Image (tube, rainbow, N blue to C red):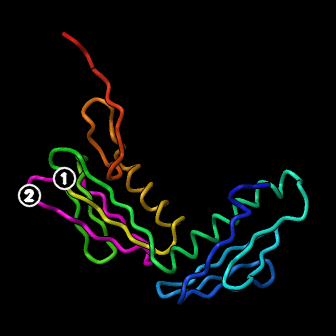
Amino acid sequence: MSRIGKNPIAIPAGVTVEVKDAVVTVKGKLGELTQEYSDVTIKIEDNNVIVERATDHKNERAKHGLYRSLINNMIIGVADGFTKQLELVGVGYRASNQGQKLDLALGFSHNIVLEVVSEVNVETISEKGKNPIVKLTSFDKQLLGQVAAKIRAFRKPEPYKGKGVKFVGEEVRRKAGKSA
């Protein structure tokens, strides 16, 4: 039995979960998310969402914990939301935003301008003496991670000086470099 899949998901106040035609719809104060599912059954019993599977077939075992985690992330997202922070480490690295347009100066000959989707809110924090931080918030965890990974991919942290775009709290493995 899946240890993650068998745990029920509590539905907080202000969140509605609807199961219809192999699609789960979750609505909350921050937004609405939908997820298609297969090979499992999803029931709503006394303010809990329960994900069950019929047999121990490999496909069903694999999807049991997957759909439970996806639905849990949807419920947390529409109730509280998710936040990711990216730190720009390097001399002259800057970030600014006008609405949903993120302008990054990452040491290339030109600035990178990224139009961020409307579901993800962008905020840039620049304090004197500290590295610039790009703060992303959204109710959709998958979309948030995808946008954050795209921004990080512009200039991944390098192992010698640690320069690049990294997540706040991320440890960059450092190398010694050449010794004279």
Report the residue that reaches farthest toward the front: 46
Q: Nearer the viewer, residue 95 or 43?
A: 43
Residue at 29% across, 44% down: 164
Is 73 left, or right, of 95 in this rendering?
right
Quarter in which the C terminus is drawn: top left
3D distance between C-alphas at marks 2 and 1: 8 Å
* Residue ID for mark 2: 128
**38 sits left or right of 179 in the view:** right
The image position of residue 60, as x and y in percent, is 83, 58
Specify the amino acid type for callout 1.
Asn
Q: What is the crowding at mark 2: few (fewer than 14 residues within 10 Å), some, or many (at least 20)?
A: few
Does the segment drawn in magenta span residue 52? no
The local secondary structure at tag 2 comes to loop
Q: Quadrant of the N terminus?
A: bottom right
Numbered circle sitting on residue 131: 1
Taking the view exactly as shown, the residue that stands out farthest to the top is 180
- Percent across and percent down for residue 177 are 27, 20
- Give the image location of residue 19, x and y in percent: 74, 83
The picture quadrant where one finds residue 44 is: bottom right
Q: Residue at x 59, y 79 (%)?
A: 33
Magenta region, residue range: 110-131
> Which amino acid type corresponds to the residue marked 2 in the rendered image?
Lys
Callout 2 touching callout 1 (CB < 8 Å): no
